[in-house]
Amino acid sequence: MAYLALYRAWRPQRFGEVVGQESTVTALQNALKEGKLTHAYLFTGPRGTGKTSIAKIVAKAVNCENLAAGEPCNECSSCSDINNGNFMDVIEIDAASNRSVDEMRDLREKVRVLPAQGKEKVYIIDEVHMLTTEAFNALLKTLEEPPDKVRFILATTEAHKIPATIRSRCQIYNFRRLTAAEIINRLKQVAANDEVEIEEDALLLIARRANGGLRDALSMLDQIYSYKGKKVNKEDVLDVLGLVDDLFLAKLMEKVFAQDVAEVISMLGQTLNSGKEAQQLAKEASLYLRDLMLYSVMGEKADFSVITEESLPLIKQQTKVKPEIIFAALKIMMDTGDKLRFADGHKYLLEIAFLDIATLTASKTVDRKKTEAMSKQITETNELPKANKNEARDVLWSKILQEVKEQKIPTHALLCQGKLLGVKDDFLYIGFKKGYKFHKERMEEKANREIVEMVVKRLLNKDIQIQFIFLDEDQYNDIVAKKAIEYFGENIVEIKD
């Protein structure tokens, strides 16, 4: 016999086997027992929560030869044929690929034909929200005047796309996401049946990533079986699903909030080089920030998506970060996740996102008097003050970064990877190490360059041209870099980690 995927092998065949959805199951069973089943139902809810499975159980129940207490017997010829997909009077339609008005008109003609094999005809229309407006109108005619012995069960993940005229002619049942405990309980049953040893942490990780969908959880477990076999631990789940450990995320965010740029870049590089995908890492970081935000507001009552006891001590320290900053960080990471779906340069986009978050916690305090005095001297002498050039350069650079950030945060995230070298002959030099080619090229784009030039002009009260240059700790080949060294000296031009 061909191998059946776990989500198919463990599909519930009777109401008593359904996980969760208690209110829906009870209502449908009572309607079957009392003979009050209506002609049209609309099942709405997230994917993998049992909509199609319950629709098939209802189809078996109305055709079962030995119905007892609203439960199909799963033994009679009708139940067996429906389970095997050979029952002529249960018709499944995928609205995603049969969405035109012609299909619905064809359905209108066929529904008037009496059942050929069973007691009643049952039409199960999945993803019904995909129908065109014309197709919905054609379906509406059938729902308004349904023939005898015909029932419709419509299923959708996007109830808001269903016209009100269709909704008003259906009984609507909303399917909820399953809890982690419900998913874990079913996974334990599956593992025990297959004689697989799986750690509790691994089960919790799968259940959380399934996001309330039992089908997704079973598909993940199936994939892990193929990789690992009869013994599964948390590390196996992380490897197979391409996830990162919550403790790694906690340590990464600790470095981000501490503005330890070098360590953030290093940790990201190591993770991506180990085979993790940038888009998945952005998703995991979003879930972590979501957990952190909830914990900062709700404390121990928060329902976590990724955080476990192992990373909780670090979480408690990070709650010192203001909730509004965490929320802003979450928005940045979610936006980055969307961008990564369609963009190249995944590594650099991810780095920028984390560095952008780091700037949210940067102090905005700058010694205004020192800045004004330094700006005046630069304006008058056209170069950095002779006394304590390093301090003067750092103060000006802090002010430039602060004001650029106020103009546009992404530009600031790019610019903060460079370093101010100095000002000479109406030129302001900003150096980037060779590894930051992406940042330098983005800063050379017109929009980003103009923001910096505008800020510098306001600070120094004169037009200044910006020169972005490459630097290398061992050798300076760039002509502009050599000129910068001549002006400002090796100790100023050199960029150190």
Image (cartoon, rainbow, N blue to C red):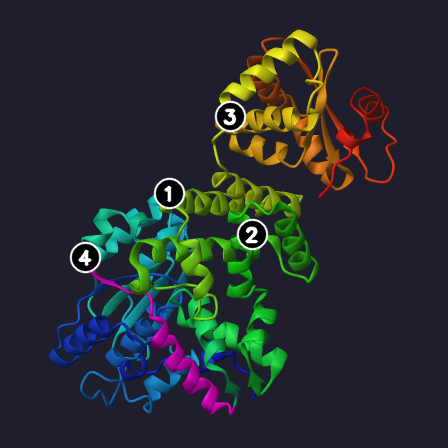
How many angstroms separate mark 4 from mark 2 (CA)?
65 Å
Crowd rating for badge 4 (residues with CA inside 10 Å; few <14, some 14–19, many 20+): few
Q: Earlier in the sequence, mark 1 or mark 3?
A: 1
Residue annotated with mark 3: 367
Q: Is residue 341 left or right of residue 306?
A: right
What's the magenta region? Answer: 171-195
Q: Which mark is residue 145?
A: 4
Does the image show residue 88?
A: no
> Which label sits in the foreground, 4 or 2?
2
Q: Nearer the viewer, mark 1 or mark 3?
A: 3
Type of residue at label 1?
A: Glu
Query: Disc 1 vs disc 2: which is toward the camera?
Result: 2
Which amino acid type is marked by label 4?
A: Glu
Secondary element type, mark 4: loop
The residue mark sitting in front, 3 or 2, is 3
Res. 208 image quadrant? bottom left
Q: How far is disc 1 from disc 2 in space, using C-alphas?
A: 19 Å
Report the residue marked by disc 1.
324
Dot 2 falls on a residue whose secondary structure is: helix
User: Which residue is located at x 28 percent, y 89 percent?
Assistant: 73
Of circles 1 and 4, which is in front? 1
Amino acid at pointer 2? Lys
- SS at badge 3: loop
Real-space Cα distance between discs 1 and 4?
Answer: 54 Å
Residue 306 quadrant: bottom left
Residue beneath the point at 76% across and 28% down: 469
